[in-house]
Amino acid sequence: LRPAVVAGRRGVISQGACAAAAAAAAACSAQPALAFAGEGSLPKEEVLRAAEKLTDFQRAISLDAATERSFTGKTVNGYAWDVKEKGTWVGALSGKALFESETKYDSGTGWPSFSAPVPGGVIERLDPGDLADARRALMMGGIRTEVIDAASGAHLGHVFNDGPKPTGKRYCMNAGAMAFVPAK
């Protein structure tokens, strides 16, 4: 009888947490998203044409907000997620600068992590998938802040408030949504 009671309590707690997440999502959903994948400042046709050059999985990351497994990512031009060279990380679809290597650090997560983006390179918004699915938001620890390419609208990853000083930000990105351009 005891396990059924515990499971029942967990069920009630889970349902209550999901209801709270749904209420938060409903309250937040009134805020318009700034851009959607394929709807940044570049024409949608140009973004879709650029996406044709990607692998199916790279396209899923950029246009459908898929996530690569940690410690496995490669940029669209073949650099490992943990490349240590100096250079610029650019959007796989836009080719526009997103992050500089000076802001990259090892967060221990297995994804390329940066403390700050290139000014104007990215847009931060409440994650539409988390807003639409309260259970997903609960599983992820709350509604996350998605990071998208300001030019193409492509999904890059998420930003968290547990990064190094001076910004305190951790831009946790998918390598497969970017290319790395080494400094000359």
Image: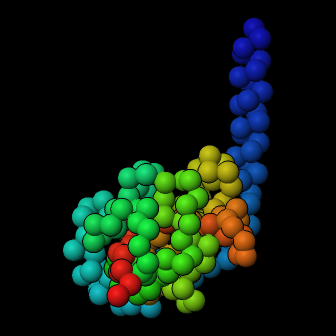
Query: Where does residue 175 sit, x and y in percent of width and height?
Result: 40, 65
- The residue depicted at 67 percent of the width and 51 percent of the height is 141
Q: Which of the 4 image quarters holds residue 182?
A: bottom left
Front one among 135 and 153: 153
Nearest to the observer: residue 123 or residue 113: 113
Figure quadrant of residue 4: top right
Q: Is residue 23 left or right of residue 104?
A: right
Which percent across, then down, holds residue 61? 39, 64
**Could you tell me residue 75's position as x and y percent?**
34, 67
| 114, above or below 162, in the image | below
Residue 85 visible in the displayed image: yes
Q: Is residue 121 above or below residue 161?
A: below
Q: Residue furthest left?
A: 53
Is 160 or 33 nearer to us in this picture? 160
Coloring scheme of the render? rainbow
Which quadrant of the figure contains the N terminus? top right
Seen at 71% across and 38% down, the residue is 14
Q: Quadrant of the C terminus?
A: bottom left
Q: Residue at x 44, y 68 (%)?
A: 84
For the point 74% across and 45% down, the residue is: 17
Q: Does residue 23 sit above or below 89 in this rendering?
A: above
Left or right, 148 with respect to 11, comes to left
Q: Tag count in the figure?
A: 0
Give the answer, above or below, for where 174 lies relative to 136: below
Would you identify the image quadrant in which residue 41 lies? bottom left
Locate residue 67 relative to residue 3 in the image: left or right.
left
Residue 25 can be seen, yes or no:
no
Q: How far from the left and from the top, in percent, is residue 171?
A: 58, 69
